[in-house]
Amino acid sequence: MQVGKLPGSGWLRQSGRIAIAAVMALSMTLIGCECKRTDFTYYNVGKKQLINGSAAQAAKDFQKSIEKEPNTRSSARAYLAVAYDRAAKKVKNIPSEAKKFADMRDKAINEVRQDPSAVQSMVIILNRQDFLSESAEGALVVLSESCVPELIKSYHKPLVRRKVQRVLVRIGPKSTAGLKEAVQSDSYNAQEKSELVRVLGHVADNQSIPFLKSLRENEAAPAGMRTEASAALYNLGEKGERNFILDNLDSKDLLARRAAAHALQFLDRKPPASKIIERLSDEDELVRESIVQAVQKHGNGRSTISALVDALQKEKNNRVVDKMVETIAGFEAAAIEPTLNALMKKQENDHWRRRQRLSRIIGDERVIWKLSENQLYDLDDFYRKETASQVQSILGDILNKIALKEQGG
């Protein structure tokens, strides 16, 4: 044995290294666990509970967050009001419980009112694309003028504009001052300003008439804003604006045409059919969509139905297609002849989508039962010759439904 060298000392050194490594690994694990524990917040847990449908439990978590987590306190206040609203809706069939949560919601909304950052958080919740947005909308209406500046600030985001418009209209005249300020501001582009002028008209506050008249008469103002001001004045009782609106259907300015087309559905008397037919082929899908909505309200006559059927076959936007099908079917028996004629007309390089759209009109409940015997024979003959399965399935369903009814099925 060598002096100064213990038996098995190599093994001891190796064991020591393993033990140190094990201790270090354990320490790192414990540190990792500690990090996860520090990431825990009542605020995040509350949001998860709310999304998962446990609104009452989420409210408790948000209350704790307000008490203990200053960094998210304002946002937690907004979510607390939303959580109480969801909880009230969940127990709507138990009046006493529903009232309890509704009272808590109203108190929470009042707390939001006192905290500008919480108001901002409520607008952020409105921007969500889920059921929480609905509760935020209701809370913002209650918050009224205190949330108008934050609502209008968010108008730059295209996806949230319709929600913001709806809330501002529901708030009513208390949103007028904020809207007028935004229209006069340099912070918004021409389209945004035009749309905000439209909202002013729907708010229906007579106090805004002088402002709208000055805008309408200002020849230096953008054509879109002037036309929206004219439409807003019409909504507020200034019926002499009708001709200005109709004239701007032919404007070279896109925003002016959009404003005029949108205003048509609110006219007391139906617009001339010639104006309707011409604009059905407008290059802008929003103009075409508004024109179809105007036809849906006013009717307009056989020439307009035929023009709609023609436009439907060429339309490229699916949303406008759906509105056209819905509108044409609304004419019931009067829609059958122009639709069947178009369906059965042979076209070079014909696409099945054209025939599918027309078949959807015939299959509508308002139309199908108005088909005459001769029209049914023609439809059956066309069905037997049709080669596209997408069209065959619709026509087959129509014929089977009629056959079942005739057999008493």
Image: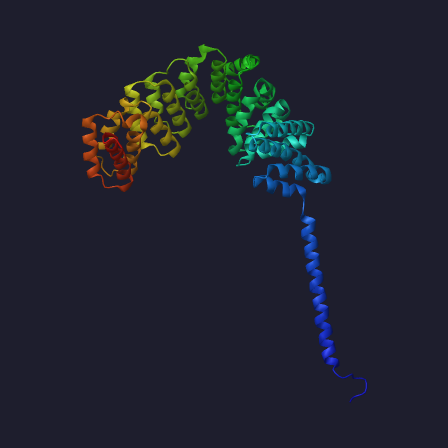
Note whether 334 is above or below 363 in the view shown: above
Q: Dividing the image into 4 quarters, which one contains the N terminus?
A: bottom right
Toward the bottom, the furthest residue is 1
Decide if residue 291 is on the left or right side of residue 73: left
User: Residue 314 is drawn in which quadrant?
Assistant: top left
Q: State whether residue 70 appears in this view.
A: yes
Decide if residue 278 is on the left or right side of residue 45: left
Note whether 90 is above or below 301 in the view shown: below
Identify which residue is drawn at 29% across, 35% down.
Answer: 354
User: Residue 304 is drawn in which quadrant?
Assistant: top left
User: Residue 205 is drawn in which quadrant?
Assistant: top right
Instruction: Residue 255: give x, y in percent of width and height.
Output: 46, 25
Q: Nearer the viewer, residue 90 or 217?
A: 90
Identify which residue is drawn at 27% across, 38% down.
Answer: 391
Q: Dividing the image into 4 quarters, which one contains the C terminus?
A: top left
How many labels sit on residues? 0
Q: Nearer the viewer, residue 261 or 4?
A: 4
